[in-house]
Amino acid sequence: MKKEMILFMFSMLFLVSGVLGATCTYMGEEIPCDEMPTWVWVMPILIFGFLFVFGILGAIFWIWMLIDAAKYCDEDNKLVWIIVIALTQFIGALIYFFVVRMKRRKLEKVN
């Protein structure tokens, strides 16, 4: 246990010392990494965060439309819509939402 802790501490010290003295290339010029413009490292984080949130919301919407199709679709088209939504994922869920669910909502408002 003691050997592993010492090895871990030396490896962390090696990593930190490498980062502190590191140089980065920006616009063809070598500069210290701590002088890099902020957007160079912030932009990928923002893009990844946006895609992550979009993916989670898309998955939630997809599951919601699958459940909606299983509960409220008429018996003739239920299996077809479940297969379409399951196989085409987000696109199928969008198609179902605009073709079937919105039509059903309009009919419910009329009645």
Image (spheres, helix red, strand yellow):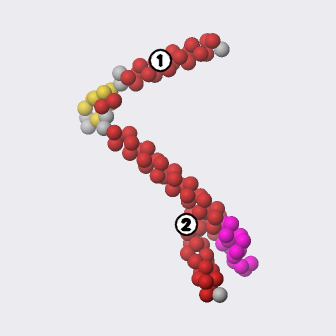
In terms of secondary structure, what is the magenta stretch mainly? helix
Q: In this orientation, which residue lies closer to the viewer: 102 or 110?
A: 110
x and y percentages locating residue 49 in the rendered image: 47, 48
Disc with the residue nearer the chain's start (1 vs 2): 1
Q: Secondary structure at mark 1?
A: helix
Residue at image mark 2: 91
Residue that appears at 30% across and 38% down: 37
Q: In this orientation, which residue lies closer to the viewer: 46 or 91?
A: 46
**What is the span of residues highlighted in magenta in the rendered image?**
66-82
Q: Is residue 83 something that shows in the picture?
A: no
Quarter assignment of residue 69: bottom right
Res. 13 mark? 1
Left or right: 98 with respect to 22? right
x and y percentages locating residue 28 in the rendered image: 25, 35
Q: Which amino acid, mark 2?
A: Ile
Left or right: 21 with respect to 11? left
Residue that appears at 61% across and 63% down: 62
Quarter assignment of residue 76: bottom right
